[in-house]
Image (tube, rainbow, N blue to C red):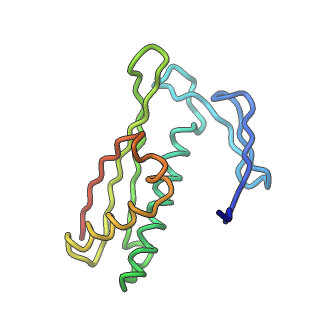
């Protein structure tokens, strides 16, 4: 298999530190959220995962829509990813995910078809499958 893209990001200080990509484009302080007993005030790994998932799923959605003859402008599609974390046992953390997809200009059946096809090709969804339950809602306007 040919790798199409690869990047390296280093983390120092764990969840109370800093991350930086090898090209320097990503360079952020990290902080444990206040909800988990930390100081907050900086991004965290769960936020980055949610942002990456929303963007990747949105791109997958645009790709399948184009393949099926639908053209959308930037404001016609919105994907909101919510990533939650729970603790099932002492020190065993589990992630939860939901996607809220809104698509303009198509009927509900078409929107659901597009989301199902995007779900089949999104690398994040593929990685999560069998590991994290993903709840999806699809709305149109």
Q: Is residue 113 left or right of residue 57?
A: left
Q: As displayed, is residue 75 above or below residue 99? A: below
Residue lying furthest right in this view? 23
Q: As displayed, is residue 99 above or below residue 35? A: below
Q: As displayed, is residue 128 above or below residue 62? A: above
Quarter assignment of residue 11: top right
Q: As displayed, is residue 13 above or below residue 52? A: above
Identify the residue at horizontal 48%, vertical 67% (top origin): 59
* Residue 30 image point, x, y percent: 64, 35
Identify the residue at horizontal 53%, vertical 53% (top origin): 52
Identify the residue at horizontal 68%, vertical 37% (top origin): 29
Q: Is residue 48 left or right of residue 126?
A: right
Q: Nearer the viewer, residue 131 or 115?
A: 131
Q: Nearer the viewer, residue 69 or 79?
A: 69
* Residue 34 image point, x, y percent: 50, 25
Residue lying furthest top in this view? 90
Q: Is residue 42 left or right of residue 133?
A: right
Q: Quadrant of the C terminus?
A: bottom left
Quarter assignment of residue 112: bottom left
* Residue 93 image point, x, y percent: 46, 25
* Total tally of numbered discs in the picture: 0
Q: Quadrant of the N terminus?
A: bottom right
* Residue 38 image point, x, y percent: 55, 22
Residue lying furthest front in this view? 1
Identify the residue at horizontal 31%, vertical 69% (top origin): 103
């Amino acid at each position: 298999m040919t790798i199409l893209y690869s990047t390296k990001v280093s983390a120092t200080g764990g969840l109370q530190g800093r991350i930086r990509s090898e090209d320097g484009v990503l360079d952020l302080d990290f902080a444990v959220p206040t909800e988990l007993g930390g100081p907050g005030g900086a991004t965290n790994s769960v936020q980055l995962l949610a942002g990456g998932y929303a963007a990747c799923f949105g791109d997958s959605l645009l790709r399948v829509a184009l393949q099926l003859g639908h053209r959308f402008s930037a404001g016609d599609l919105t994907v909101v990813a919510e990533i939650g974390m729970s603790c099932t046992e002492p020190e065993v953390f589990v992630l939860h995910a939901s996607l809220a997809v809104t698509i303009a200009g198509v009927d509900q059946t078409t929107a659901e078809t597009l989301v199902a096809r995007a779900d089949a090709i999104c690398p994040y969804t593929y990685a999560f499958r069998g590991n994290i339950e993903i709840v999806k809602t699809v709305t149109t306007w």
